[in-house]
Image (cartoon, helix red, strand yellow):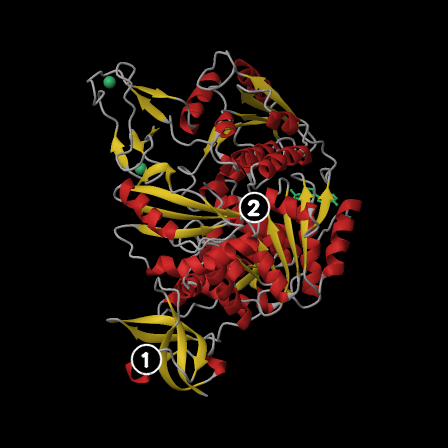
Amino acid sequence: MARFARIALDVPLPRLFDYQTPGISTDDIGRRVHVPFGKKNVVGLVLEVTDSPDFPEEKLKSLKAIDTVLPPLPGDVLDLFRFCASYYHYPIGQVALSALPTALRRWEFEPPKPVARYALTLEGQQALPNALPARAVARHRLAVRLKSGSADSIELNRLCGDAPKVIQDWIEKGWAILHEDASVEATITRPVLLTEQQTAVEAVTQALGGFAAFLLHGVTGSGKTEVYLRLVEQALSKGRQALILVPEIGLTPQFTQRVAARFPETPISVLHSGLAEGERLLRWKQAAAGKAGIVLGTRLSVFTPLPDLGLIIVDEEHDASFSQQEGLRYSARDLAVFRARQRNIPVVLGSATPSLESWHNAETGRYTRLTLPDRATGASLPELSLIDIHNMPLDEGLSPHAIKAIGETLSRKEQALVFINRRGYAPVLHCPVCAWVAPCPRCSTRLTLHRHGHRLRCHHCGHEEHIPAACPACGNPDIRAIGQGTQRVEDALARHFPAARIVRADRDNTRRKGSWDDMQASIHSGEADLIVGTQLIAKGHDFPNLTLVIALDADGALFSLDFRAEERLFAQLMQVAGRAGRADKPGRVLIQTGFPDHPLFSSLVTHDYAGFVRAQLAMRKAGMLPPFSRQAVLRTEAHELGTAMAWLARARELIPVHPDVEVFEPVPAPLLRKAGLERAQLWLQSPSRGSLQKVLQEWAPRLHALRAAGTRWHLDVDPAEN
Ligand code: ADP
Ligand code: ZN
Ligand code: ZN
């Protein structure tokens, strides 16, 4: 028993808050509480109990209530919060509250409705989907999903708006049943593992029961997912839970379905930001109660309480979406490794193009490297070649070679994909008379022209405006769109191939729930001939009839100031190339570039990731850049650059001197203005993580004590971006 609770609150101060709580005990650590704070009552989390508070007793307020319904958060999750707070130098209360499901951040929340699980009967298995009208796309999706195993109503509702009605109808027809009503016979087909897969599975299996980190490097289609599934099977058979982290766009219904089909009897909690609050809470509770055998989710799922956690997998570990870029800026991949060490279990990081950080860890022996060198189905790797567009006439960015290759592919009744990592119609609206370009009034960037609605839009801040009838600077009515985005390329392709059915996939037209799923289905079923898209299309489904990939305009990244730009470009091109020729037909990839002699491309066309990485690591080493050093950056924004720079200069004076830590001068950010504010930053770098952390440890409290003076700031540790 103790008399005071020390509580984490969602406020930007790096400390806990003491409250009078006669009768509280250590068993209450990890419980939600309702406490008065300022003029409001807010939700907090008990992190410690004590008899000797930091402030005079009589000044401390009392708790209003303590939540004894929800079980307290387990100690390892609280330790994870503490680690995040100390490593990322972010207020502990904000760490804790932002890692909880949103519903729990409010005191009163709607208790989630119980969900039902459904399965098909034998009759249903036979009747579906043939008994459905061909046009009933959503019902087909339901049928295909349920044929692969039982599913809960949340997932089914996501696949089909009418799911409750349809399922009821199927139950009446004798095609479907509540899963609890019967055990379902499901036939699970598992391929015989290839030697390399077998080796990988054995290596990790032997490590179950202790901490070990593995880097699973395998080209697209090499059977990494199959390895994950076998490992999950091992963990489940020992009564343990498996956590599978995937990138934001990697969490496709196809992937979920593949996992569900393999483990038809195992409740799976799928967690992502698109879930409604109640759904998320329900799945989180399932996981926290140990009921979900598998948790499959995006970055935030790394904080899920998992009492029986036995294995962590991070798929596409290099993916940028594992880094949270707001609030608590963390890397879910790095936290996954921390959690594995904390829980004494193995973690597997898989990728076709591992991050240089993970690669380096494998080189230095911190991680064990496992390699899958070939495609599992025996399909050959796509043939990559370059189109030198230097001095070549282009039609809306498309070279004559590219157009010819598309024509040939279409005439063979195969599909082609054109990859351009820029959405919208054109990136610049330009006046040829006075050289005016349409600027964003709030950012130091240009507005992108969008065809639909004839609008100009800022991709940084969301600002929108009408397209002017004439140049606002000189009055010239003949203003022009320069450069290409997906919409313009789509138009050009429609002009060249009027008979082709074209699908465009970018963030603008896949925002609606399920629309990208529908597009993928139409590509899969052969309803589309030509696909134009951004990196969104680089991941996910196999399209067996897709045999040609064309990458436009890859060169920007070659001259970027961001030292990670080439690494990202390589990964992206490798990933889109992986879409070509996955089944029986060989695939071809054409990359348009004005710099065909660039070393990045010679590694790319020979599928030599190791060679590319070696060259990159040599450059990083010469520049003492990560992974050979650790970085942190203090970023700040203000109405005027001068204010931001002056604040950074004062912050810089507060940095303790350390022989191993290099402190740079404050500089304006690469994108100077964003959403009306001007930004500056200050970099710190050290060959030693420990030394850098030591400096940050002393510095961070001083920053909190420094008057903000019209600025907003945050510290980014291991920043993923410049
Ligand atoms: P990755 O995750 O590396 O892209 P997948 O696990 O999805 O690779 O495998 C690619 C394809 O190869 C899938 O269609 C999968 O079913 C198949 N596959 C995987 N392992 C084997 C195997 N051992 N034998 C035959 N086919 C396999
Ligand atoms: Zn003009
Ligand atoms: Zn803007």
Q: Does residue 323 appear in the picture of this structure?
A: yes
Three-letter amino acid code at disc 2?
Ser
Where in the image, quadrant-wise, is ligand 3 located?
A: top left
Label 1 sits on a secondary structure element that is loop
Q: Residue 680, how many percent across, how many down?
A: 35, 42
**In the picture shown, does residue 467 fall above or below 296?**
above
Q: Which mark is residue 152?
A: none
> Where is mark 2, residue-wise?
629
Q: Residue at x 69, y 59 (%)?
A: 233
Q: Residue at x 29, y 38 (%)?
A: 463
Indicate which disc, 2 or 1, sits on the residue closer to the N terminus.
Answer: 1
Q: Amino acid at mark 1?
A: Lys
Dot 1 crowding, Cα within 10 Å, few <14, some 14–19, many 20+: few
| Label 1 C-beta lies within 8 Å of the nearest ligand 3 atom | no
Element assignment for label 2: loop
Q: In front: 719, or 630?
A: 630
Closest to the observer, 452 or 106: 106
Query: Marks 2/1: CA distance?
Result: 48 Å
Residue under label 1, please give it: 64
Asked whether residue 167 is in view, the answer is: no
